[in-house]
Amino acid sequence: MKTTLRKIRLPGRLRVEFAEQGERGGMPVIALHGVTDSWRSFEPVLPHLPPDLHVLALTQRGHGGSDKPAAGYLPADFAADVVAFMDATAIERAVLVGHSMGSIHAMRCAIDHPSRVSALMLAGTMPWFGRPPEMIQFHREQIAPLVDPVPEAFARDFQQSTLARPIPASWLDGFVAESLKVPARVWRDAFAGFIGDDFSARLSEIDVPTLIAWGRQDVFCCAAGQQAMLRLIRGSRLVEYTDAGHALHWEEPERFARELATFVHSVAATSATA
């Protein structure tokens, strides 16, 4: 199935790149990557998705080939970009798939713009990235001091830390290359944004089907965080990847694609009978 890379200017905002595949009339699925990634974060998944899904993998502001403004790196800013992107591509409602930082933006979008979100699939997530002491320490000691050029070894170590098992070397090299496109100020501001904005008290406002995907070997998101997600988002359910880490969609892309497609099809079927 052909994947097309495009760029579009958001109404009154910035220009972003995105990859698109599938039938234009199919169920819209917008994929949101993690911090310092790009649309390529979902590149291993895309070939395994059925053509009846209209998939748009967005490169968010500050990342990859999208514009890199001087400000606007709070989750609410990213969520507003998603809605502007939907306006620009004539999409009324979509399933949002978010990995890590992208899951925060997906949840924020569902809270701030509920009429635009039909369902959520959240991978490598938790309700409060700013609470774990190890995350606070990592941000303070490793991210906050970053300056340009970001060292290649640092970007590689960061991406490697998301994995519990090896992936093809060419994939890892590509993900590292995408991280190196991100200026140090965006590393700092994006991390500060999703660590500093704890809106977990509002997760109960989410009222759409929600699938949470978690790798048991995730060094960032623990089991307790997944149980908290289930309590906070009513009707949500959890799928576990026993041997996968934080980047479970890189380690098991076929399974991730299969579960995403099954989830989207179930949402579409429910909507058709509602």
Image (tube, rainbow, N blue to C red):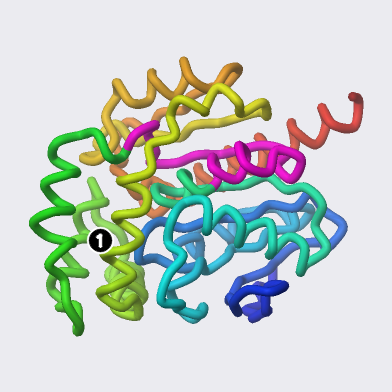
Tell me if residue 243 comes above or below residue 183 in the rendering: above
The quarter in which the N terminus is drawn is bottom right
- Give the residue type that dot 1 points to: Gln
Q: From the viewer's perspective, tell me whether residue 233 is left or right of residue 207.
A: left
Near-viewer residue (76 or 208) = 76
Q: Can you give x and y, in whole percent of width and height, for residue 139 in the image? A: 18, 53
Q: Is residue 266 above or below residue 173?
A: above
**Which residue is disc 1 drawn over?**
159
Q: Residue furthest left?
A: 141
Residue at (64, 55) in percent of width and height: 30
Q: What percent of the width, then of the height, locates residue 136?
A: 17, 44
Residue interval drawn in magenta: 106-128
Figure quadrant of residue 145: bottom left
Helix, strand, or loop for circle 1? helix
Whether 105 is drawn above or below 145: the answer is above
In the image, residue 191 above or below residue 164: below
| Residue 264 inside the magenta-drawn segment | no
Question: In the orientation shown, which residue stands out farthest toward the right?
Answer: 273
Residue, x 57% and y 53% (percent of image)? 79
Query: Where does the C terminus fall, quadrant-wise?
Result: top right
Task: Give the crowd class for mark 1: few <14, some 14-19, many >=20 residues within 10 Å.
Answer: some
